[in-house]
Image (spheres, rainbow, N blue to C red):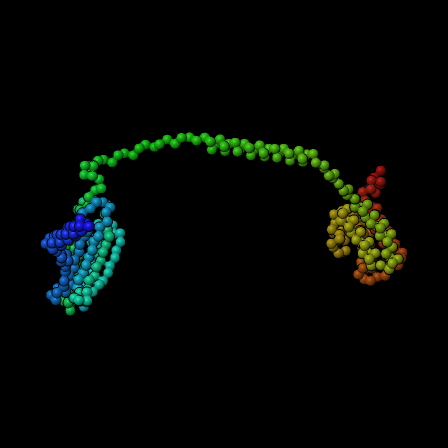
Amino acid sequence: MVLADLFKHRTRLRTGGTTLLVLLFVLFSPEGWPQPPENRVVPTSENPLLVQTQLEPKEGRVGDVYTYQCTVFSFPDTQYELPEVGELLKDFEILSFDSSKTTDESTGVATENIVYQITRFETGTVEIPSLEVRYWVGEDERTVQSSPLSLVVNSVLPPDEEELDIQDIKGPVPVPLNLRPYILGTLAALLILAIVAVLATWIAKWWMGREKTPEIIAEVEPAYEQALRMLRELKEKDLPGQGLIDEYYVRLSGIVRVYIEDQFGLHAPERTSEEFLDEMTRDGHLIPDHKKLVSGFLGHCDLVKFARYGPEGREMESAFQSAERLVHETSPREGEEESP
């Protein structure tokens, strides 16, 4: 117990002595004394506006970031005009810009602080001109200038390597020829061509081997045979016996008109009897007797169809015989029988 108490007491003395030595060093060391603010600027009644510029750091390397600061101290009622600060930094690349204004309530001094972050990519010593600020005291215009600044920009290379020449670029590197895409493309093209050939052959065989539908060739009935058939059918219907006299004459004249158009090329169905007879007169396909027969036949039909003429039985039979006679006498078959 006694030894432990002695050890604790000795430790306390050592600790207290160390603390006392530290306090004495701080009090009597020049570095430990309170330092006044660096470059403290206070405007006066004679100089109501002061300007201060500073650059940190004042030496660096290419591509480093430097801080250029401009501070204006003035009384609140002092009017002033700052120049374009960016013109002073035309030899630099401006990275960022910031500004602020504060007022010290105890002294009434207003402070405007402008900060630029800048950099430079060329070596050498660069001068930053002084900043000139215009201000007015009443109607009196005055100017105040800051001190010019300089910056030393060094190379990023070590001093012993600054004189080294830039090495020439290397020559082109040969690209190895890869034939695989060309081979695969050729094989794919050949495969596609083979598939197309197989499909074409199969389609051709199917087309050639399919059952062909027999073509139905419709025999064209001659005009005179068609006319005679239609006359027989008209006679079998016995329209006059049913009291359909107008319809009978319409069909009878229609058969004759269609026959003349098909046999001689005269457009009879679409024309009036007068127009058709006029063209028939100028045409040379019909002989005069046939022309006279057609003229009498169409005139009789028009009387029944348009003049409401009521024909007798023998007149209707005579009209039918005239149509039948015209077909027989103008048909090619009749011409062949008469030619020998």
Q: Residue at x 73, y 54 (%)?
A: 270
Task: Tell me if residue 295 can be seen.
Answer: no
- 20 relative position to 217: left or right: left
Q: Residue at x 82, y 45 (%)?
A: 225
Nearer-the-camera pick, 28 or 286: 28
Nearer-the-camera pick, 256 or 155: 155
Q: Residue at x 57, y 32 (%)?
A: 194
Task: Tell me if residue 97 can be seen.
Answer: yes
- 11 relative position to 230: left or right: left
> Residue 123 in the image: x percent, y percent?
20, 44
- 211 relative position to 309: left or right: left
Nearer-the-camera pick, 238 or 217: 217
- Which quadrant: the C terminus? top right
> Residue 268 in the image: x percent, y percent?
75, 52
> Residue 167 in the image: x percent, y percent?
26, 34
- 73 relative position to 226: left or right: left
Nearer-the-camera pick, 121 or 328: 121
> Is 211 located above or below residue 321 in the figure?
above
The residue lying furthest to the front in this view is 1
> Residue 273 in the image: x percent, y percent?
77, 55
